[in-house]
Amino acid sequence: MKYIIVLGDGMADEPIASIGGCTPLEYAKTPNMDRLAKMSEIGMVHTIPEGMSPGSDTANLSVVGYDPKKYYTGRSPLEALSIGVDMEDTDIALRCNLVTLTESEDCYEEKTIIDHSSGEISTEDADVLLSAVKDAFQNEVYQFYTGTSYRHLLIWKKGSVATLVPPHDKLGQVIGAYLPEDEMLRAMMKKSYDILVHHPINEERRRKGLNPANSLWFWGAGTKPALTSFKDKTGKNGVMISAVDLLKGIAVGAGMENIVVEGANGGLHTNYYGKAMAAVRALTEDDKDFAYIHVEAPDEMGHQGSLENKVLSIEYLDEKVVGPLAEELDKAGVDYRMVILPDHPTPIRLRTHVGDPVPYLLYDSTAPQAHSWHYNEKEAKESGIYIAEGYKLIDHLMSR
């Protein structure tokens, strides 16, 4: 038996009046997921433990099978694993976003954050900008590392875990009340604006009509993680297929193999089909037991508040991941069990994460069921099936 998780990050949402009271998942044309739903168990699963922040970090840890209350030490330490940073026990890792702030205000604290991803800036452009920041701030205490797109890393030697605000939670708001209390972190953010605002990369981005990456934003602080081996936990060897450092870091910590797919970038126009085919090869040719396919696009479109593109990202996932994946596995004649789900909702209305339960679909190629339902939040809830502790979902997947 082979096992697969297809995760559409942030795919769940709320009913939206402009599309007839449907959610984006309900409204999107998803013939492949709906076909599987009619042969599957569907239900709701709560991936975010009570009292914990509804982030992709805690949620994906749950879905991979790790109880966040036991294993979570912060988002950035997981990203540090992906980048290859060997943290010491006294290090603090912080996510270092390149964000877009308004530029008309003289006072930094009076600026408004308008884009947490600087228009999904390319890693190549971001690396140049981060080099300028390193020249100003890098020393034995503060060490910067380039990640992917807008997502980068600061290691604070012998630092302290501070309460820092995720930028995607405060889009459209004046930033003054959300800046770090730590004086050095705050000073670096303010100075970064002066360094970056007229950088040639950003001047070129403006000419192209793109958002400039004109400030750093620190958040997601945490200490060195310690995950137990996925193979030891489940008895299965697994692969992670994602363009996002957080997911790659979870894989490194769990001893899973990361598969890099050319053209996979975490955006709307990522290489969906390449991810599906990478999973097929891992399961059918490389003798892997488990594949985790992570698609970031629905979450990014939710943060952007783009209903049209969130719907499109879900349709792409259905057409270019779920459909080809099931077709190729069926053609190969392998037995498989597959879960499809979001990690958390990212409602268009809020443009940030919430901790509500999410719909899942569990398909078993050896025991297809017979139902009339479709895969969406409403019908999954109506099924009456509910998994209260998200980290137990993987045991349910691998129960046979």
Image (spheres, grey):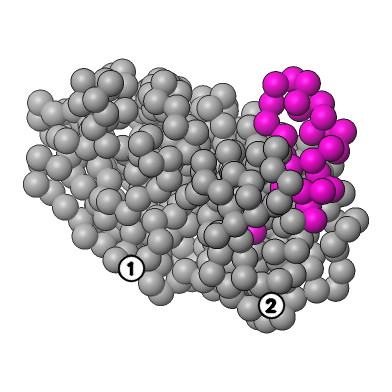
- The residue closer to the viewer here, 168 or 194, is 194
Residue on which the image places disc 2: 159
Q: Residue at x 71, y 71 (%)?
A: 183
How far across and down, in percent of the image, does residue 234 sit? 38, 62
Picture disc at residue 72 = none
Rendered position, 53 above or below 56: below
Q: Residue at x 13, y 49 (%)?
A: 385
Q: Residue at x 65, y 42 (%)?
A: 101
Q: Residue at x 84, y 48 (%)?
A: 195
Taking the image as shown, residue 309 lies to the left or right of residue 151, namely left
Q: Which segment is the magenta one?
A: 191-218
Q: Is residue 234 magenta?
A: no
Rendered position, 15 above or below 116: above
Rendered position, 52 above or below 88: above
Can residue 286 be seen here? Answer: no
Work out whether mark 2 precedes mark 1 in sequence or the reverse, and give the earlier one.
1
Q: Is residue 207 magenta?
A: yes
On-image quarter of the N terminus:
top left
How far across and down, in percent of the image, does residue 213 sit? 72, 39
Residue on which the image places disc 1: 51
Secondary structure of residue under mark 1: loop
* Marks 2,1: beta carbons within 8 A: no
Q: Total number of numbered labels?
A: 2
Amino acid under label 2? Gly
- The residue closer to the viewer here, 96 or 365, is 96
Taking the image as shown, residue 247 lies to the left or right of residue 91, namely left
Amino acid under label 1? Gly
How far across and down, in percent of the image, does residue 245 sit? 61, 50
